[in-house]
Image (cartoon, rainbow, N blue to C red):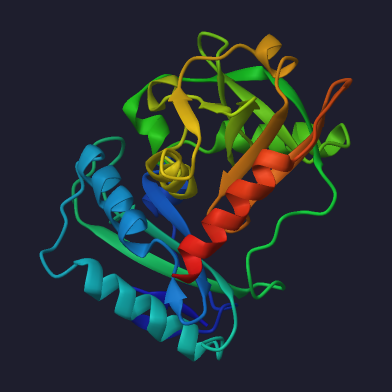
Amino acid sequence: MVNLNGTLFPADQTLFKAGNRAFLYGDRLFETIRYQNGKLLFWEDHYFRMMGGACILRMEIPIHFNIEFFEDEIIKTIEACKLASNSARVRLCIYRADGGLYRPTDRSFEYLIEVEKLQSSDLYLNDKGLEIDVFHDHLKPKQALSNFKGANSMISVLSSIYAHENGLDEAIILNSESHICETTASNIFVVIGKSIYTPALSTGCVDGIVRKQIIENASSWGYTLEEKNMKTFELIMADEIFLTNSIRGIQWVSAYKNKTYRNEVTSGIFDKLQRLVNA
């Protein structure tokens, strides 16, 4: 089942007509949320990131579209899919109502909720490290829209194709100044000694939810963390590299080009994130 504007439909039912602005112009945003142990992980952060993006896109937000409303709609969809006792991937998409060409005639938005069962009931650190390399074909712009999910996903789409064609797990995306931005589906962190570095939001990376948790808690966990501009040559100097996103939590990288990495610091951070999730 999927939830379109509060009504549940079979997932294989046709829902949209020609003129849908998400299809025509990519006039939409989305959040991908992990549901685990009966709760939406870091739900408040997801909600406020989505609403912040809606404001930047100049969508009109109905007053009843508050945090409780969307949480109730998501849980309703999870229950309709009979996944309340499982872990699930939730995708909440908001898109502007039909009408107009580039200039919309209606600034209100609609929403679609999709739910998919996850194979793993809990977060876990990957046994086999990821292999990554750089995607050079297209650069991500440095702008506020780049910090939100869905405003322009084509570079992630193309980088995922590149990764697949080259036997990689993910590909590094660069910004318009050739600084490291993120990877295909994750934020990126570089570990040198006890110091951790990650691209700043000003690079154009997604304002990741797990990224936010690590930045806010790194000091209390005993690590020094800095947001900074990084070039790819700095990856060669790293002791460890790890990636973060809302579904997998943390994944460690074992290889970039001919450089290999361990995962000692990464394992410690994963354990602390897991305790944060289970608190």
Q: Which residue of the protein is positioned furthest toward the left in this rendering?
A: 63
Could you tell me residue 121's position as x and y percent?
Answer: 65, 75
Q: Quadrant of the C terminus?
A: bottom left
Could you tell me residue 185's position as x and y percent?
Answer: 61, 43
Could you tell me residue 261's position as x and y percent?
Answer: 80, 31
Q: Taking the image as drawn, is residue 75 in sight?
A: yes
101 up-or-down from 86: above or below: above
- Residue 67: image quadrant is bottom left
Q: Residue at x 81, y 43 (%)?
A: 129
59 up-or-down from 257: above or below: below
Q: Residue at x 45, y 36 (%)?
A: 206
For residue 271, side relative to residue 94 (left or right): right
Q: Which residue of the protein is positioned furthest toward the front in this rendering?
A: 222
143 up-or-down from 276: above or below: above
Q: Taking the image as drawn, is residue 185 in sight?
A: no
157 up-or-down from 246: above or below: above
Front in this rendered view, residue 40 or 272: 272
Q: Residue at x 63, y 48 (%)?
A: 268
- Residue 239: image quadrant is top right
Q: What number of labels is visible? A: 0
Front in this rendered view, residue 117 or 7: 117
For residue 65, side relative to residue 248 (left or right): left
Could you tell me residue 43's position as x and y percent?
Answer: 36, 63
For residue 128, side relative to residue 71 (left or right): right
